[in-house]
Amino acid sequence: MVGLPSWARLSVSCQSDDHLYDNEDSEYQESSSRKSSSWGRDTTRGKQVPLPMGVFQWKIDNRLGNVIPTENTDTAVHNFQNWKMQDGMKGNFSHTGNTGSARLNRIFIDRKEDRDFIFLTPLDFFNEGVSNFLFTNTKSPITNLAYHSCGGSQNGEDRVRGNFATNINKISGVGFKLDYNYARGYYSSQNLSQFGAILYGYYLGERYNMHAYINSNHLKNAENGGLAEDSYITEPWKYQQKFDTKDIPVNLSSTWNRNDDETYYLTHRYNLGYDREIEVPDSLKPQPPSAIEFLDQLDDSVRVALSSDSVARQLAIDSLRSKWERELIKPTEFVSVASIIHTFQMRHMNHTFYDQGRNSAFYTNQYWGAGNNIEDRTSVMSIRNTVGLSMNEGFRKWVKMGLTFFATHEYRNYAQPTHMPDTSFQTKESEHEVLVGAELRKANGRLIHYKANGELCLLGPNVGDFNIEAEGDLNFRLGKRDSATLVVKANIQNQRPTYLLRNYRNAYIHWDNNDLSRQFRTSLQGEIGYSRTRTKLRFGWNNLTNYTYLAMQNTLKPGAKEGSIVPADYTHSVAVRQSDASVQVFTASLSQDLIWKFIGWENEITFQHSTNQDVLPLPAINIYSNLYLQFRIAKVLRVQLGGDIRFFTGYYAPDYFGAAGMFAVQDASHTRMTIGKYPIVNVYANLHLKHCRIYIDVAHVNAGSGNMFLAPHMPMNPMTINFGVSWNFFN
């Protein structure tokens, strides 16, 4: 890939989620051995020229547009069935049921921070931001089509994805991605539909670099409020007649959350520098013409005159050789000394809550509207511009790091419903914010890499907020063939809770928390990996002061039995809370992969401890184990047969409140429900032939009576047979 920077020369094969391009089978054979006469025809028409194949992918930093190389991890077959898994590759997410529904990571150190638009945080399985998107450079145009399906016409789900990428030339390319997900739901009022489209382009010249990205997502999720009574799942023997999952009563009907997200992103930079000559080995340098060839350039009369004078003849040859050396084009390379950076991002996000089912009896409060005609919209529009000046790493041998200074201005506009008697309108509020920061970065070299950055808010409602991050990795050898890697991350931040945690309202929720204190967070994470034994150890420590969270509030209905554990006997609301004391979380995780001939066994166990389970509930142990066989049939068909188990210990898992579309800590009372202590077993088969991958997965094979919940009152889907296919087309 001439013309691409070194970071882009990374071959990325087909991966389980977004690495959908496959580099295998890069040699094409002629598709036909048919012989035909070439008389009077183009003799090349009967031949198929081998098609060049190869895919190179990378991510970018959202703020400064720095390129982040992706790892060359071949997962073309391995665990391909997990790309559709709502609970994650290793089952670390709790969710409300369908693929694309709201979810929450049980491993605290892996949780993403609350976005300013908090409604999208639980929907990160489908809604991906620019920092997670893979830009693609390909030797030839490539199209990938992927399809997932399970269940039937009444309860199943379907997901279709299409990716296209092509190069304009060696340093620029464009592409798009389409994604559609539709789930009918195994339980009543659980359907969802989601559509996303991404258009992108890039230009990677010597002096000018550019990445452009447009994303449009539309997500509509029905909300059923959970089961009216959990005993339908936990104690099915109490009921004399058999029933389908659709027959189990739920708390809500005709209720939806809709989220629309449009992002326009551009990051570009102009590199300042100079050209320097490339040292070329003598063996690769062009050889000068011979003496006779030099003299042949002269007129005949001059050659005749020189033939009798050997001294003049040699002087003429030397002069011509010197001229040839002067006019010789010597290879050079551009050296970037500094860069002027500009990043622009505009986002328009809408959250709409619909209630058309007369569900007011489910909620503790109703501030406005009829129970069957509620449509509350909250909108956020933000425009962010960042300018930076960077001194680049490596333009001199002694320059071992890069240094960047940047400043950011962000404008945000919020619109929320406000209802007065017989009147409905939106109130709007705007904010301006100015931040300054710096970044120190070392990306070159084999032994050590690091990055440290910090930013401070100078103007705006969040003045005084700061965030300091640092990470580094050390790669070292243990003997001649063994190697180990140490990765360390640290973070200190002092930030005001986001606007929507301070101010939000709809027909059933109203909070005004402008007096919330700043959250102060300190975290330290580390990871040690030993390649020979395929061992990885992670550890983490988090200290949270003024930890801010959502809390459920359940109120017993008049006439209901005191101490009831039936959800339908209570009304529900949610509020924002802050912890009075610091909360600490300790994490340790061990991953061990074993491979012997055609047998593989992956294991991961994670230990966690939260010092306040009422504020930040976490399971003490999470376990993932995957046993599989991997082999080839007829040398061309790759096969993987296996099964995995996912398990976590019991804890008071956060509840899901549909009116807000977010998870909230369970009410600290007798109504709390323990989640966990229930294994989830899946078996699967993966097939890979040429550019086609197929999987068949039987999920939750052990479905039956028991604690089949990942979130309170939200049962898991019963056993399902899943099918999926992914096909690459090189054009």
Image (tube, helix red, strand yellow):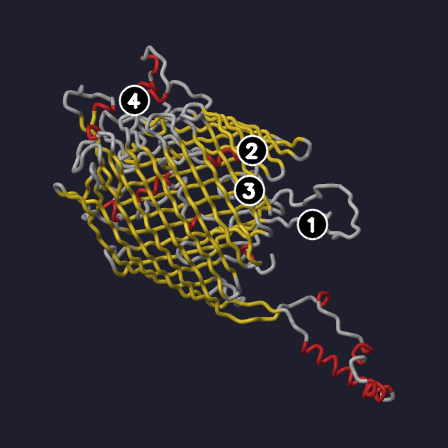
Residue that appears at 40% across and 25% down: 154
Which one is closest to the eye, mark 2 or mark 3?
2
In the image, residue 246 sits, relative to residue 632, either above or below, namely above
* Distance from Cα at disc 4 to Cα at disc 1: 62 Å
Please rate how many residues cluster around mark 2, counting C-alpha atoms within 10 Å: few if below 14, some from 14 to 19, many from 20.
Answer: many
Residues under labels 3 and 1: Cα distance? 24 Å
Badge 2 or badge 3: first in the primary sequence: 3
Residue at the disc numbered 1 = 49
Question: In front here: 53 or 338?
Answer: 53
The three-letter code of the residue at mark 3 reads Cys
Q: How crowded is mark 3: few (under 14 residues within 10 Å), some or many (20 or more)?
A: many
> On the image, numbered disc 4 is attached to which residue?
249
- Identify the secondary structure beneath mark 1: loop
Q: Mark 2 points at which residue?
A: 694
Mark 1 is surrounded, within 10 Å at the Cα level, by few (under 14), some (14 to 19) or many (20 or more) other residues, namely few
* Mark 3 or 1, closer to the camera: 1
Check the image and report above or below for 252 versus 533.
above
Which sits earlier in the primary sequence, circle 4 or circle 2? Answer: 4
Q: Which amino acid does the dot numbered 2 rest on?
A: Ile
From the top left corner, tell me how far across and down residue 690 is, in percent.
63, 38
The label nearer to you, 4 versus 3, is 4
Q: Give the Cα distance between marks 4 and 3.
A: 42 Å
Which one is in front, 37 or 190? Answer: 37
- Residue 14: numbered disc: 3
**Could you tell me which secondary element the residue under label 3 belongs to?**
loop
Mark 4 burial class by Cα count in 10 Å: few <14, some 14-19, many 20+: some
x%, y% of residue 477? 57, 48
Q: Which residue is more in the foreground, 592 or 209?
A: 209
Disc 2 is placed on an element classified as: strand
Residue 87, horizontal then vertical, whole percent: 42, 33
Residue in view at x 78 percent, y 45 percent: 36
